[in-house]
Amino acid sequence: MSLFGIAWRNIRQRLLTSGLTALSLALGVALVVATLVIGDVVKQAFNSGSGLGYNMIVGAKGSPLQLVLNSVYLISKPIENIPWAFYEEFLPAAARGDGVAGRYAGSVQTAVPICMGDYFRGYRVVGTNTAYFDRLTYGGGGASAFARFFARIVGGSATVGAPRPFAFAAGRNFRDDEFFGGVLGADVAASLGLKVGDPFAPTHGADDGLVHDPFTVTGVLARTDTPVDRGVYVNMEGFYLQEGHAKPVDGAAPKPAARDPHAAPEPLPAAHREVTAILVETASLPGLPAELTAMGLRTAVNEGRDGQAAEPIREIAVLIGLFVRPLELLLLLVTALVVVVSAIGILVSMVGSSLERTRDVAIMRALGARRSHVLATVLIEAVLLAVGGGLAGWALGHVLVAAIGPLITTNAGVSASLLSAAPAAELLLVPFLIGLAILAALLPALAAYRTDVAKWLG
Amino acid sequence: MAAPVIELKDVRKSFAMPGGETVSVLDIEAFAVAEQEQLALTGQSGSGKSTLLHVISGIMRPDAGSVRIDGHDITRLGEAAADRVRADKLGLVFQQFNLLPGFTALENVLVAMSFGSGKPDRWRAADLLASVGLSHRLHHKPAELSVGQQQRVAVARALANRPRVVLADEPTASIDAAHQEQVIDLLKTTCAEQDVALVVVTHAPEVAAAFPRRLRLEAFNRAAVHHG
């Protein structure tokens, strides 16, 4: 019979004590695994914003973090709107009515306007144009050179694979002339059960606000695992035509005309238009590093009075510093406490059974067992408990994550399932537990090592 | 006379009492047990019987003298080496049987084998248990066995590593008079079959009477005599 077999027998002999120890260990490990995985998932949620298809957001002056939270993560409130004329400063001559290139157009590759403020059953409605899905990308470092540059500075990671164009799981992007066409993010379509062709009517300002005209779903996006999955995107031309969306000029806003369903609607005049933000992909100017182009554009915009330019990757780094790092520290603290409690559990179990064990040890020593044998047997017993409890806890932790997955999805915007993992930390967990178990069992193992055989055999 | 499997020379052992007084328990000039010999050691309570067994088995070190087991002076060996000699050369049968309660009869024998130089051998362990009449109780734990059956497991376990000598400490003290003879017969027969010497420590004259050689500890332990 091997020492392993003897240790296993000892565990079975004290089944209740051993079982309770393994159970407490498993619960502790489950908590650690769940917190590690959830922490990782939440971090991914923030990091997913770093793989944007743009490297700059232009919006009203105010908090750049708020601008990013609102534009990228679709959370928080918009700061204010910016004038349409300011947006046009980012457009090339061909895209402007006056045929003159905008002030910043030379530094811009793509500028996509977004208008916010409406909701649809808990999800943000974003008014935009076709370029959002036709020209922007997601994942990796679409914005890329700039994003990578800042990622290097802040020590984060901006690249999570190559930038990918948006794909549609069903249907297509709305067309410019489909004023009342809309595209749904994967989560929105899945949770609301909407499909191509279904109508949906956004509400103004809040879920219980004024109900706007219905839009029609032209497409459902394939999953991107970014905040885009949680957005409802409508043609901004239709968005502008809703009540309360036209900017009053000289104190008067145009009244929405009763629309003739058979006639093409008239677009809102530029004078009444505003945008909430502009998603900008900067151009690479000949002979100039892309980072410097972006830096120059940012400086130019921020020195003006019309708005501010924020780099999402930098703000995301601030965000992570503000929320994710403290969260990680908190999780680390919880983990440390759980680990200490687990170690004490093993110690208590081992010490608790030491009287019974001492007699067995004395018998084994009388039969010729070396002190090293009894030391090893006690340590193996602890390791077996740690491995058993650890693996059970690991599995339980993942079940726990799967159970609260929907809650995480709702709040963090990323899916957490049975297979979600924090691989690096999880791989270290069981070896760490084994080390911990050995440490905790050292005291009872040494007591067994020192057992006075003659005294116990009488 | 054949070469001794146990040989003690000038062995002394004393214990320090709480008050600082030292009490001598063993003072033996010479004691030997020959190969395959079977003898009974008797003595009054406190005559040093258990201490002598502990010293012979290497569980306790004497203050002076030498203890040779099959030629190995265990007083000169390190603890691990002395443990190995005990595992390989000696088989112990205790008064309280001292079986491991969480292990089956078979496993109790296998555990003893795992500390010896050879590999644990399930078939031999089963054979040993069969030789003491327990082939139908291999997978029973001590609590599921009668007192007599537990004693038989203890005998089989003592023979697990093909020892040169079996030391039995009051093996009949925990069983009724009707079974005493059976246990002694079992020990004598089994040890004889395996060519193993047998030393039985007992305070019961009727048990000692079953052995051709009987020694009173007081006769050769000067400390016991002084105690008186």
Image (cartoon, coloured by chain):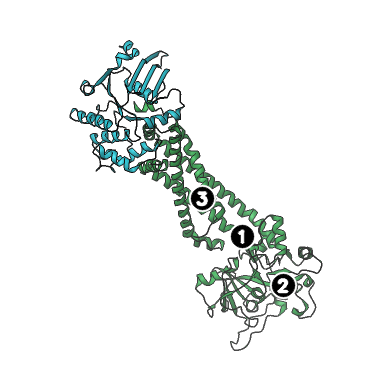
Dot 3 amino acid type: Val
Chain drawn in cyan: B
Residue at which label 2 appears: A110
The chain ID associated with circle 2 is A
Vertical comparison of B128 with A388: above or below: above
**Chain for mark 3?**
A
Does residue A9 appear in this view?
yes
Q: Whole-percent x and y of residue A210?
A: 57, 73
Residue lying farthest to the left in this orientation: B178
Q: Residues within 10 Å of mark 2 (few under 14, many from 20)?
A: many
Left or right: where B6 falls relative to A80 = left
Q: Viewer-proximal residue, A315 or B67?
A: B67
Mark 1, residue position: A46
Q: Amino acid at mark 2?
A: Thr
10 Å neighbourhood of mark 1: few (<14), some, or many (≥20)?
many
Q: Position of residue A195 (x, y in %)?
A: 52, 77
**Chain of the residue where label 1 is placed in the rendered structure:** A
- Residue farthest to the front? B1
> Which residue is at the front of the view, A52 or A92?
A52
Three-letter amino acid code at the position of disc 1:
Phe
Instruction: Say whether mark 1 and mark 3 are on the same chain.
Output: yes
